[in-house]
Image (spheres, rainbow, N blue to C red):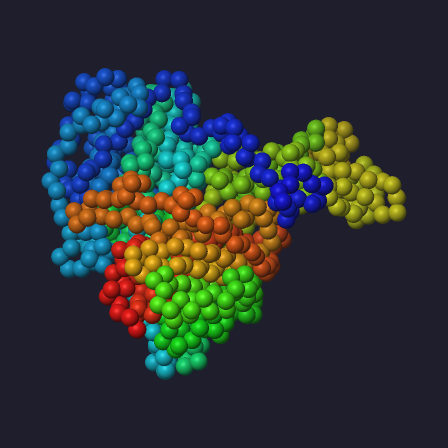
């Protein structure tokens, strides 16, 4: 049952109602599209209808005659406004090829939706009408969408300066790979396709840019996940002092990685605001976003296992060919590498090899989408584990039990160390919840009677690394940024507390969860805690929200800031009570002296710190502390998910009957918030398995350009999920917490697809390409043949 109020010291671990929801439910939130500035004009981007074409000329003369017209610019007009390319922060090898990426193309369009001009007008409708009058003369070129085809001889070349579509080859090896595979009595090799996906945040992207010439200062309001990173990189792209650029992320309606980027429209808006001397606003349309906002996944995957005859996996060897799209966005090259150390899964393997090849294609750039490299890894691992079980005629449960890592900390064959986990405990609980033996009996009964609706059971046991830290490791793997984050706590003299955080929410519940941490440590009500975020002028330090890092990095920074506040308060209290600081005990916001009635709360110390009438010699007034936390390790969640599906063998329709998720995510601050994160993540992973797919035709046209053809699930397509947790707290941070925002997506796709294949196993089916839509399932049955 949710609670709204608790005694001091009892918030952490409680399902406190979200503080954010009142303004959300009453329409008081302020998103980009709700904001306006005096004198503001609207921007509309002219985008290429061709996936690959030389730009011969751009004529804006007719647009200048349109009603409400303010200005128009081509890529060539603005070419000198950019001091640097739009950034990619992770060039994963020393020889990774990074093409110049201007906010507007100048020489040729390299994907459908590539911007070639921009028009400004007094209203949004007028800007759109005027943009449609811009005449662009294109010379169409051949397109290439499939990353393997892009690497083939004779493929159309996107970036002539490289003479190839090959961007990078990244390799990682550990252990005696050749020896293990050479001596293995059993090997299995599988090949799968990770289809391209389109993120669908409920709020489209949008920006407002303002330039104040008297101060030579810029302000950008953006629906972004990364205001601090955006500020840093836009200062570089525009060649302006970072101190003169403020970035504000107001209320942001979802992201899932799609707003983890430095986009062309953000840089464009700032440059245009300076050029025309008026604020500039751009809001994305949904169909425009399907072309102009990053996509996810797009891999060809191969996995080979070396195993003993009893099912013990000794070595893994994987190869990925990744479609990067036309350019490198912020983490495009690094997204598949985020799973690069995980292709052994939660299993104790001794030899490890991974090769990742990145290829440019004439499609929207791919980048981090919920899970970012980890769902792709888990899918390949868990599908191949089931393939090995089939080859050895073993139950999927048995083969997983035989291979689990059981002792922690554990250094993987890939080189990283898992600090804690309980994979077997999670699987045991999931099996208990689903009633595994009973479901298997029902499955066998249906098979025996030749039922047209067959039952399938799919498992997915996983581990993941998240938090994107520590900084030293990030530097070693060529990631441009650090992995730290920061928090500031300011105790006001009237008893309330201001919290400034370097991460910012877009649906995760930061305000509630972080209030719970501070309320517990400082002994105040959560209603006395104000959490301030998303404004680089209010909180200078921060590395923002992505990769399930907000609690595991930012929340731990907050905890440590509270400890600094408590220690300063201890000195004030000891001075006022005329005792040694060592004589003070602290609990729930209150200092006491054993054996006496002397006591003082942190809130009282805050008032004394404010008046500064009687502070210890040399102590600065005010009760405030900042902590910048750089974790010693990644965060390592894990767990076990089970899907039960029913497949209609006559129509190919797949019906998800049950879904069980048992996750190990360390200590939980707010179980209700965690459940919400798991629900959303599971739904997105199921959507990849059953519904979602971005499809291009041979000419590079996106044929799934709206929600009519790109199937985003609603509540009608989903079911009630059955959730539980086991707990192996992280020993590397004082809260014992781990990330949770991506776990559901990481585990669920493989669980559902394993269930679909399990249901079809009597027909000789061992794979169905995602998404498992009815036609594909039906064809697999027809082509598989009954066994």
Q: What residue appears at the point 39 percent right and 77 percent down from the top-left corner?
A: 392
Image quarter of the N terminus: top right
Would you place residue 315 above or below residue 149 in this image? below
The percent position of residue 374, horizontal first and vertical second, equals: 41, 57
Residue 271 appearing in the image: yes
The percent position of residue 97, horizontal first and vertical second, equals: 27, 52
Please identify the quarter of the rendering in which residue 394 is found: bottom left
Q: Pick the residue in front: 786 or 596.
A: 786
Q: Pick the residue in front: 154 or 343.
A: 343
Please identify the quarter of the rendering in which residue 299 is found: bottom left
Q: Pick the residue in front: 691 or 163.
A: 691
The percent position of residue 28, horizontal first and vertical second, equals: 50, 27
Q: In this view, does 466 lie to the left or right of 499?
A: left
Would you place residue 108 above or below residue 785 in this image? above
Would you place residue 740 above or below residue 291 in this image? below
Q: In this view, does 298 lie to the left or right of 467?
A: left
Image quarter of the C terminus: bottom left
Q: What residue appears at the point 22 percent right and 55 percent down from the top-left corner?
A: 146
Q: What residue appears at the point 30 percent right and 68 percent down from the top-left corner?
A: 763
Q: What residue appears at the point 55 percent right and 70 percent down from the top-left corner?
A: 406
Q: How many marks?
A: 0
């Amino acid at each position: 049952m949710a609670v709204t109020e608790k005694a001091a010291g009892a918030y952490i671990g409680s399902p406190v109602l979200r503080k954010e929801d009142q303004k959300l439910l009453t329409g008081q939130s302020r998103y980009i599209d709700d904001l306006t500035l005096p004198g503001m004009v609207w921007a509309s981007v002219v985008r290429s209808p061709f996936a690959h074409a030389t730009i011969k000329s751009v004529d804006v003369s007719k647009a200048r005659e349109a009603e409400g017209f303010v200005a128009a610019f081509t890529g060539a007009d603005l070419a000198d406004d950019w001091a640097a390319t739009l950034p990619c922060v992770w060039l994963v090898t020393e020889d990774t090829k990074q093409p110049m990426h201007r906010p507007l193309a100048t020489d040729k369009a390299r994907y459908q939706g590539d911007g070639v001009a921009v028009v400004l007008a007094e209203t949004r409708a007028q800007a759109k009408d005027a943009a449609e009058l811009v005449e662009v003369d294109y010379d169409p070129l051949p397109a290439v969408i499939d990353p393997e085809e892009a690497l083939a001889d004779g493929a159309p070349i996107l970036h002539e300066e490289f003479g190839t579509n090959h961007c990078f080859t990244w390799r990682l090896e550990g252990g005696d790979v050749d020896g293990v595979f050479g001596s293995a009595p059993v090997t299995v090799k599988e090949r799968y396709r990770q289809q391209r996906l389109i993120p669908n945040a409920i709020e489209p992207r949008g920006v407002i840019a303002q330039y104040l010439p008297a101060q030579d200062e810029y302000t950008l309001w953006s629906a972004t996940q990364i205001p601090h990173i955006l500020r840093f990189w836009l200062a570089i792209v525009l060649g302006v002092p970072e101190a003169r650029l403020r970035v504000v992320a107001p209320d942001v309606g979802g992201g899932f990685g799609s707003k983890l980027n430095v986009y062309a429209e953000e840089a464009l808006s700032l440059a245009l605001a300076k050029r025309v001397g008026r604020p500039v606003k751009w809001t994305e349309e949904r169909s425009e976003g399907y072309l102009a906002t990053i996509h996810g996944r797009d891999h060809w995957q191969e996995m080979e296992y070396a195993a003993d005859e009893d099912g013990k996996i000794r070595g893994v060897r994987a190869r990925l060919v990744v479609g990067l799209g036309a350019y490198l966005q912020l983490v495009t090259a690094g997204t598949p590498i985020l799973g690069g150390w995980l292709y052994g899964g939660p299993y104790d393997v001794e030899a490890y090899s991974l090769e990742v090849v990145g290829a440019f294609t004439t499609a929207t750039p791919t980048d981090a989408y919920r899970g970012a490299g980890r769902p792709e890894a888990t899918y390949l691992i868990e599908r191949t584990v089931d393939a090995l079980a089939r080859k050895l005629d073993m139950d999927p449960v048995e083969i997983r039990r035989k291979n689990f890592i059981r002792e922690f900390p554990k250094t993987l064959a890939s080189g990283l160390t898992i600090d804690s986990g309980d994979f077997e405990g999670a699987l045991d609980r999931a099996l208990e919840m689903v009633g595994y033996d009973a479901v298997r009996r029902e499955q066998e009964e249906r098979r025996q009677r030749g039922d047209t609706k067959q039952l399938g059971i799919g498992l997915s046991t996983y581990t993941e690394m998240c938090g994107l830290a520590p900084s030293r490791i990030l530097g070693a793997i060529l990631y441009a940024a650090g992995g730290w984050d920061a928090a500031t706590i300011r105790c006001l003299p009237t008893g309330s507390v201001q919290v400034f955080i370097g991460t910012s929410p877009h649906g995760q519940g930061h305000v509630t969860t972080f209030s719970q941490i501070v309320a517990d440590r400082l002994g105040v009500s959560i209603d006395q805690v104000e959490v301030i975020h998303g404004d680089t002028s209010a909180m200078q330090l921060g590395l923002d929200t992505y990769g399930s890092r907000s609690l595991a990095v930012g929340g731990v920074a907050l905890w440590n800031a509270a400890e600094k506040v408590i220690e300063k308060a201890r000195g004030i209290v000891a001075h006022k009570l005329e005792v040694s600081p060592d004589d003070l005990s602290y609990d729930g916001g209150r200092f006491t002296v054993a054996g006496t009635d002397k006591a003082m709360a942190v809130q009282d110390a805050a008032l004394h710190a404010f008046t500064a009438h009687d502070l210890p010699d040399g102590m600065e007034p005010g009760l405030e502390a900042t902590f910048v936390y750089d974790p010693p390790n990644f965060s390592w969640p894990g767990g076990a998910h089970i899907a039960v599906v029913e497949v209609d063998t006559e129509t190919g329709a797949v019906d998800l009957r049950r879904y069980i998720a048992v996750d190990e995510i360390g200590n939980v601050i707010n179980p209700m918030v965690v459940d919400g994160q798991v629900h959303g993540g599971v739904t997105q992973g199921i959507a990849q398995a059953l519904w979602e797919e971005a499809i291009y035709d041979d000419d590079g046209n996106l044929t799934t350009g709206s929600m009519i053809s790109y199937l985003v699930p609603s509540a009608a397509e989903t079911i009630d999920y059955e959730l539980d947790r086991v707990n192996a707290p992280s020993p590397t941070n004082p809260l014992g917490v781990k990330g949770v925002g991506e776990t559901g997506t990481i585990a669920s796709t493989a669980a559902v697809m394993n269930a679909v294949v399990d249901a079809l196993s009597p027909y000789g089916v061992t794979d169905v390409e995602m998404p498992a839509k009815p036609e594909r399932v039906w064809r697999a049955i027809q082509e598989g043949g009954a066994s």
